[in-house]
Image (spheres, rainbow, N blue to C red):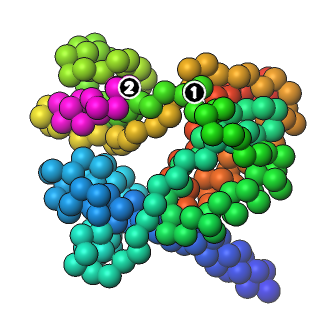
């Protein structure tokens, strides 16, 4: 009986992992399809598609799945048409949020986002009341072992990066939106494949949440939004000090 119970737990855990991976692959396929529809199916000429494919490969998405998503985007195979929407919202404690959605059903996504927010002490915000708190930026990460911190700074500045942050594991380059591809290309010319490259919303200033319960409520809402099937990204302006992270 003990063995049976153990196997049941293993199957349950594996099922949860498989479900999570399936949801991730679905999101990646949507992004690849949409990128190919916007800019064509050649990763050398379509930077957004290249970024999406790179992200998919990092997550070990099968090559045939990637190719099928590209063909759906270019029209070689039948596929859905997706629309990009950015919702402005507030999390508990007045934390500002920008929620990027990629959906084939605007009405369904709007209703779902509104429900998620209302169930977790959040709310939608008026257009423009949150977005001004953020700036659009490019973010590129390369493995820390690929170069030294001095090399990362020198090459990043030369390529046009606005800021470079280095740690033992990672070098992160922050760029203007139109310089993302240039800096990523510079890394590839050096023989370094970025671990990730993406456009994000970066808060001008962060709000610090000191109270533990408030911090947990915000993190719970973020987890639910990020897990939602149509979410491309969730960006906030909050930070939690170590004293409130327990």
Q: Which residue is mark 1?
A: 132
Q: Secondary structure at mark 2?
A: strand
Residue in the picture at 30% in, 49% down: 48
Rounded to the nearest angstrom, the CA distance separating label 2 from label 1 is 19 Å
The answer to whether residue 195 is visible is yes
- Using the image, tell me which numbered label, if any, was put on residue 11: none
Quarter of the image that includes the C terminus: top right
Residue in the picture at 68% in, 46% down: 222
Percent x, y of residue 85:
52, 52
Residue in the picture at 34% in, 40% down: 197
Residue in the picture at 19% in, 55% down: 43
Left or right, 38 with respect to 232, comes to left
Q: Which residue is mark 2?
A: 174
Which residue reaches farthest front?
127
* Overall secondary structure of the magenta section: helix
Q: Secondary structure at mark 1?
A: helix
Disc 2 crowd, CA 10 A, few/some/many (<14, 14-19, 20+):
many
Left or right, 108 with respect to 105, comes to right
What segment is highlighted magenta in the picture? 171-187
Which residue reaches farthest left?
189
Between residue 226 and residue 94, name the one nearer to us.
94
Q: Is residue 180 magenta?
A: yes
Percent x, y of residue 177:
34, 32
Which comes before the other along the chain, label 2 or label 1?
Answer: 1
Percent x, y of residue 21:
51, 66
């Amino acid at each position: 009986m003990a063995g049976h119970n153990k196997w049941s737990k293993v199957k349950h855990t594996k099922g949860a992992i498989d479900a999570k991976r399936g949801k991730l692959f679905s999101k990646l396929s949507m992004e690849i399809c949409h990128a190919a529809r916007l800019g064509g199916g050649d990763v050398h000429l379509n930077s957004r598609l290249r970024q999406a494919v790179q992200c998919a490969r990092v997550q070990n998405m099968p090559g045939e799945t990637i190719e099928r998503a590209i063909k759906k985007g270019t029209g070689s195979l039948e596929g859905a048409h997706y629309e990009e929407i950015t919702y402005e919202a507030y999390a508990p404690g007045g934390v500002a949020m920008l929620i990027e959605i990629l959906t084939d059903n605007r009405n369904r996504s709007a209703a779902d986002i509104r429900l998620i927010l209302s169930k977790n002490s959040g709310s939608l915000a008026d257009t423009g009341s949150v977005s001004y708190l953020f700036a659009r930026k490019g973010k590129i990460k390369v493995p820390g072992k690929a170069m030294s911190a001095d090399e990362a700074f020198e090459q990043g500045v030369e390529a046009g990066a606005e800021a470079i942050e280095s740690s033992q594991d990672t070098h992160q380059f922050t760029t203007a939106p139109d310089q993302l591809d240039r800096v990523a290309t510079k890394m590839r010319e050096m023989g370094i494949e970025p671990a990730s490259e993406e456009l994000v919303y970066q808060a001008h200033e962060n709000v610090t949440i000191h109270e533990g319960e408030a911090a947990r409520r915000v993190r719970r809402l973020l987890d639910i939004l990020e897990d939602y099937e149509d979410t491309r990204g969730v960006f906030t302006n909050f930070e939690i000090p170590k004293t409130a992270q327990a």
